[in-house]
Image: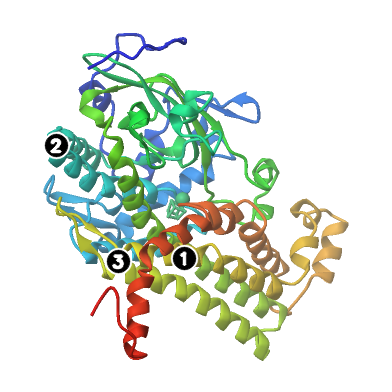
Amino acid sequence: MNDIADTRHFRGTGQEETAQERWARFKPIATGEDYLNSLRGRKITCYLFGEKVQDPVDHPIIRPSMNALKATYDLTIADPDLASAHSPLINARVNRFLHIVESPQDLVMKNRMQRRMGQITGTCFQRCAGLDTISVLHSITYDIDAKHGTPYHQRYLDWLKLAQANNIIVGAGMTDPKGDRSKRPHEQADPDLFMHVTRRTEQGLYVRGAKAHMTGGLNSHWICVMPTMNLGEKDKDWAVVGMVPADAPGLTYIYGRQSCDTRALEQGSIDQGNAQFGGQETLVVFDDVFIPWEHVLMDGEYEFAQEMVTRFTAYHRASYVCKTGLGDVMVGAAAAVAEYNGADGASHVKDKLVEMTHLNETIYSSSIASSHEARQLPSGIFMNDAMLANVCKHNVTRFPYEIARLAQDLAGGLMVTLPSQSDFEHEIAGPLLEKYFKGRAEVPVEYRVRMLRLIENMTLGRNAVGYLTESMHGAGSPQAQRIQILRGMDVERKKDYARKLAAIPVKVVS
Ligand code: SF4
Ligand code: FE
């Protein structure tokens, strides 16, 4: 254990919590209500709109994102076969978001659960990146130990048993801010632009840096910090994986705003479109945050960073099947609004719904095929097919935009010219709006307004983050998938197939 000369202000106290103390404050979570209560009273520093948030749980902008995670607990009660599984680690049923992948069927069930969660919430429910982190750590810690004789895999299993027993949420702290993209981590003018180890002691190590775009960061109980890209020997201090409680000293959350988020501060909930559920992205800053050795799962094994990222993206890019659940909501909303408008009998309306469904099911087919084609890794865990996962995510960077375009087409311009809920409730303006915004006679105007606001929410408003922009950039932007597809497409072998049929000597395969 070497101390690193840290020339700048160091904030560790030297009297840090032990691994046991860190777990001692958790109680097993059974229900969605338990989950919300588990987030109350934590000592967390979070900024939103230039102010410290006193109570995130009851903050009107933050709460919908917590409700989406709450639904992952509620689903295990409503549909235990779908949302829970037997864990041999603790010999008990656990939430599927904490279950290790024992078979291709586990991955298929994960995808089905993700689609269902998308249908229920209409947004990003924030728990999959943590599940995919757990999955990749099983095999990576095993592989590092096999090469270096390190104790990471057992540490991982010990941590996971407690995570399963307490039914916690783990957030994936992967994306570093990255600074100058032309420079490696150790070459950056500011070393903190990639998370790195600042000091090692007998008890553990300290990390400094930040994780950006952290999905559900503030709603998590634990955060796993891990490298964001391939690393070289000089980047050894940046090759760190560790588990950190979300309320550990030294953490600061800065809440990312989303379009139309302040509608949650207005009177009434109709204009929000989906007042109940939302996503969450935060910048999480780590200022010399302590990690006891029991929770350190990589420290310096830089050569595994690339493989870790590759396996993580294979899992996570197939997780983007979540967007098919949102796509189901989009198809339903477009069909409903066409019905309210009296246009549902038109053949072009049906054709547009068919096109939306075709695109949505194309995403689903690539994800579910990726899971069926899973293979076993040396640690015993299964990993879905990387090529099909990249194809799935690449489809997701495109098709939701077309599905959203068709939903807007069917919604009509009223979606973006509708007056506010307050106007509908006004004594003079209200009756005028009721009269002139009537569609089908038997359909209340309010239904029409609500459905249009839902489409607005998912294609322009708060949950357009979850349905569109996250589809573009989450789990890697489109070019990242194209690089992986290029690596995996084995074009030389395919040239041979052609050469053979054209009676030209083959080069790679016979
Ligand atoms: Fe899960 Fe989808 Fe959100 Fe990622 S974008 S955390 S896969 S719901
Ligand atoms: Fe994501």
- How far is disc 1 from disc 2 in space, using C-alphas? 36 Å
Disc 3 designates what residue?
371
Q: Position of residue 305 (x, y in %)?
A: 33, 41
**What kind of residue is marked 3?**
Ser
Residue type, numbered disc 2? Gln
The quadrant in which residue 369 appears is bottom left
Q: Are marks 3 and 2 in contact (CB under 8 Å)?
A: no
- Residue depicted at 45% across the width and 62% down the height: 393
Of residues 294 and 82, the one nearer the viewer is 294
Give amino acid for label 1: Gly
Could you tell which of marks 1 and 3 lies nearer the N-terminus? 1
Q: Which residue is under mark 2?
A: 154
Nearer to the camera, 97 or 362: 362
Q: Residues within 10 Å of mark 2 (few under 14, many from 20)?
A: some
Which labelled disc corresponds to residue 325?
1
Taking the image as shown, residue 398 lies to the left or right of residue 242, namely: right
Q: Secondary structure at mark 3?
A: helix
Does residue 192 appear left or right of residue 246 in this picture? Answer: right
